[in-house]
Image: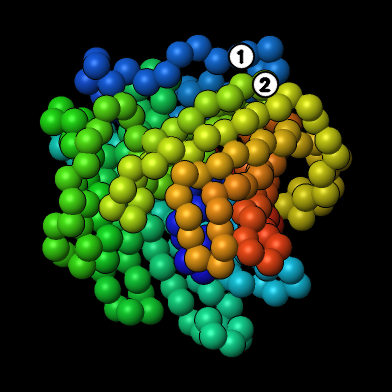
Amino acid sequence: MRIVATTLVLLLFGWCAGSGQVPAHLSGVGGRTSSSSPPGIQQLKEVNERFTYEVRYGFLRLGNVQVYLKGDTIYHDTEAIHVVTEMVSNRRIPLIGYKETHYHNFLAWNDTIPYGLRFWQNSLHHEMEERYVYDFDYNAGKVFSFEEGEPVDTLELDRPADSGPAVMYYSRLFAGTDRHTSYPIYIDHEKSQVRMHFTSQKESYNSPAFPDEDVKAYYMSGNAEFEGPFGFSGDFTAYFKDDILRIPLEARVSIWLGSVRVRLVEYERLD
């Protein structure tokens, strides 16, 4: 499940709602293609969603992932939304057993881009809270990383960034366009980039989350600039639903022997 924790959560799972301001010198990105009508940031802010994903490697179900909103909060005088990503392994698989990890994010936005304020991981199977923590200080231009309560590093911060689902929220703004863009992430106590290549080409997609619909999906490929276990080299692909919200349907990451697939199996609108 480590490969899911360090890549697919970053590339696929998202958040909605929240607010806040980034200093002017960290103002975000330029304009985006609008001909294929992806959602605007205001549209995504107003939606309350719950996602349930199934994680598979070939015929093996590795586990499930749920993403949902826990509520509004204030962090460092900035309004934000508390987003939770819960990952639970399939305990029947040998060498994996029971693993449950919860990722928490305080996320905000400016007029064009989402960004993280605080990210932390709770490892329930180890009975450890805040095992990893990243604090984003935009005024100071620094990210402070911690592990098991101890400071590890202080990293430079020069634009809106995150360690979690803001990447997916960001990607929904471009899904269905012919754009190439990137988003900075902080992971494993280092700064990396997620590079994304979108396409406006649609194709049919058989979605278990929308069994009664003739779903069309947009394809996206990319690369995360870090390596992981099982031969993960950073390459990934994703599909987004052709609708006003660009719901993320699936992501795959390449590993040494094949790929790991995360697929949406249930989607709920809670508003």
Rendered location of residue 146, percent (x, y): 20, 57
Mark 2 / mark 1, whichever is N-terminal: 1
Task: Tell me: 24 left or right of 193.
Answer: left
State the CA–CA distance, disc 2 to disc 1.
7 Å
Rendered location of residue 189, percent (x, y): 28, 52
> How many residues crowd mark 1 within 10 Å: few (<14), some (14–19), many (20+)?
some
User: Residue drawn 83% across and 49% down?
Assistant: 206
Residue with the mark numbered 2? 178
User: Residue drawn 65% across and 38% down?
Assistant: 221
Q: Nearer the viewer, residue 87 or 187?
A: 187
Q: Nearer the viewer, residue 194 or 30?
A: 194
Residue with the mark numbered 1? 33
Task: Tell me: 264 left or right of 110.
Answer: right
User: Residue drawn 68% across and 60% down?
Assistant: 259
Rendered location of residue 240, percent (x, y): 68, 38
Q: Which amino acid does the dot numbered 2 rest on? A: Asp
User: Residue drawn 48% across and 82% down?
Assistant: 98
Q: Answer whether labels 2 and 1 touch (C-beta < 8 Å).
A: yes
Q: Nearer the viewer, residue 201 or 156?
A: 156
Relative to 186, residue 38 above or below: above
Task: Tell me: 154 left or right of 104.
Answer: left
Residue 222 visible in the shown view: yes
- Regarding mark 1 in the picture, which secondary structure is present there? loop
Residue 43 visible in the shown view: no
Depth check, mark 2 against mark 1: the one in front is 2
